[in-house]
Amino acid sequence: MDTSVPNFLFEEQHPEAKIATEQLLRQVGKGAYQVHISPAVVKELEATPDLKKRKALLDALKRFRYVTLELTNEVFDLADRYIAAKIIPQKYRKDLEF
């Protein structure tokens, strides 16, 4: 899961995305799906400038179980291949760095 998913819980300008996200997370809570989150996602949520929203985003993660992915050399190599293939822009490579 990337940061856009929990952010859609608070997206008032796109109510359809908010509703779909709420439905998805209800299904996750029932065990229908297994969610994987990288430490980079948690780091990005923790860096949310608005303290109230930051707390709400981090609280949203507590509503369901998820697996925290390890950032291994394989992950960095795959990211570099995605960038080389122009699947992901180079500017997002920094999202893997702590």
Image: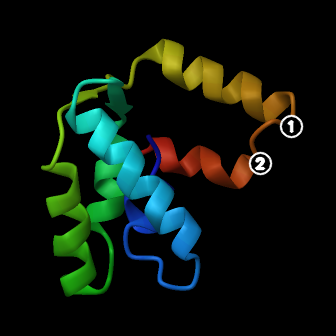
Q: Are marks 2 and 1 in contact (CB under 8 Å)?
A: yes
Residue where numbered disc 2 is placed: 89
Residue at image location 33% in from the left, 24% down from the top: 32
Quick check: 42 left or right of 59?
Answer: right
Residue at image location 20% in from the left, 72% down from the top: 56
Rendered image quadrant of residue 24: top left
Residue 50 image offset from top left, x and y in percent: 29, 86
* Mark 1 residue element: loop
Residue where numbered disc 1 is placed: 86
Q: Residues within 10 Å of mark 1 (few under 14, many from 20)?
A: few
Label 1 amino acid? Answer: Lys
Q: Is residue 97 above or below residue 54?
A: above
Quick check: 94 left or right of 24?
Answer: right
* Mark 2 residue element: loop
Residue 71 image offset from top left, x and y in percent: 38, 25
Q: Is residue 91 above or below residue 81?
A: below
Residue at image location 36% in from the left, 25% down from the top: 33
Residue 77 in view (yes/no): yes
Residue 3 image offset from top left, x and y in percent: 44, 55
Q: Is residue 80 above or below residue 55?
A: above
Residue at image location 31% in from the left, 69% down from the top: 47
Between the C-alphas of marks 2 and 1, the distance is 6 Å
Residue 35 image offset from top left, x and y in percent: 34, 30
Q: Residues within 10 Å of mark 2 (few under 14, many from 20)?
A: few
